[in-house]
Image: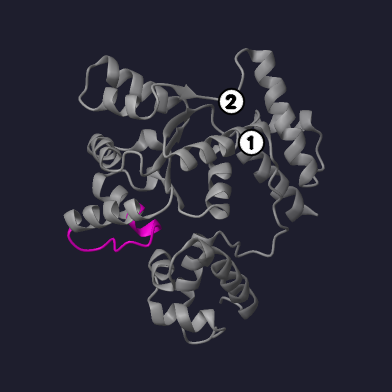
Amino acid sequence: MITDTLKEHIVAAMLEARNHFNSDAKHARVLGINSAQYSRIKKGELTGVLADANWISLARILNVSLNNTVQWTTVKTETYNYIYSQLQACQNRSISAIFCDIAGIGKTHTAKCYVRENKNAVYIDCSQVKSKQKLIRKIAREFGVTYTGRYADVYEDLIFYLKQLPNPIIILDEAGDLDYAAFLELKALWNALEYACGWYMMGADGLKQKITRQKDLKKVGYTEIFDRYGNDYKKVSPEGKDALKDFLLSQIAQVAQANNSKSTPLEMYARTKGSLRKVRTEIEKQRLAA
């Protein structure tokens, strides 16, 4: 049962996110509800408008926790500052880049924070939309464009809409999970939106290996995609075992202190091997045990 208090938190998050869209109808489309339902809950109606399943879906999309946990504090680590500034540059100048680095250093969290704080920016988890159709329909939905119906219409409507927006950016996380047809469609979409849209492709080392391998095999499309995304792989973590450990320890110390961890940075590093995703899990377990 979704309580009225939780519904109020969801509506508050919805109203905050509304600032990123040109109309209620577009935001409603992103949230997967109709305009009438959107209007009613926007006015404060919490009962009889949506089923609990819909409220749960809204909470997921708006990143509202269903549990009464302590608020997580985002820390501007070296990774956060690097990626955030890269995203700003890509969006403001309508250019593209690829960020490939080790897992667990805060790539995804930073990208999601950026999207929450900046208009006309969308985040796509490519591991959930690996095929061409799912990818393009997902991008369309995130921008509030009609994403159902004939695929060719969705594709053309998306291009038309993005060309009207001031400095949109599309962040592609876990891009290495996309299938071949989806990669080729990204090239086509990039061509259609040249100098009209920023792109930022992210992944762990596997993404770099995939693109490099396919380029070496002369597979059609990969050299062109790499060229369009800057002919370079960006990263923030340093080379060398000792330097990398110091980098990870520094990030752990910042995150742990900001979120009142009961463990020292060295203790946390031993349990997580430097992954901030695992650091959050450890801290949440400490909170539950308190």
| Quadrant position of the C terminus in the picture | bottom right
Q: Label 2 crowding class (10 Å Cα cut-off): few <14, some 14-19, many 20+?
A: some
How many labels, in total? 2
Left-right relation of 15 to 165: right
Question: Main SS of the magenta segment?
Answer: loop
Residue at 32% in and 61% down: 145
Q: Dot 2: what SS?
A: loop
Amino acid found under the numbered disc labelled 2: Val
Q: CA distance from mark 2 to mark 1?
A: 10 Å
The one nearer the camera, 42 or 203, is: 42
Q: Quadrant of residue 288?
A: bottom right
For label 1, count other residues whose C-alpha is less than 10 Å away and answer few (under 14), some (14-19) or many (20+).
some
Q: Magenta stretch containing residue 112, yes or no?
A: no
- Bounds of the magenta segment: 139-150
Q: Quadrant of residue 217?
A: top left
Q: Are marks 2 and 1 in contact (CB under 8 Å)?
A: no
Q: Residue at x 60, y 23 (%)?
A: 237
Q: Position of residue 89 (x, y in %)?
A: 51, 37
Instruction: Label 1: state its secondary structure.
Output: helix
Quadrant (top left, top right, bottom left, bottom right) of the N terminus:
bottom right
Can see residue 66? yes
- Residue 251, relative to residue 192: is it above or below? above
Q: Nearer the viewer, residue 43 or 134?
A: 43
Residue 285 x, y percent position in the rendering: 71, 49
Name the residue that disc number 1 marks: 81
Q: Amino acid at mark 1?
A: Asn
For discs 2 and 1, the disc positioned in front in the rendered view: 1
Which comes before the other along the chain, label 2 or label 1?
A: 1
- The residue lying at 39 percent from left, 36 percent from top is 175
One can see residue 275 in this view: no
**Pointer 2 residue:** 236
Q: Residue 6: x percent and y percent?
A: 62, 73
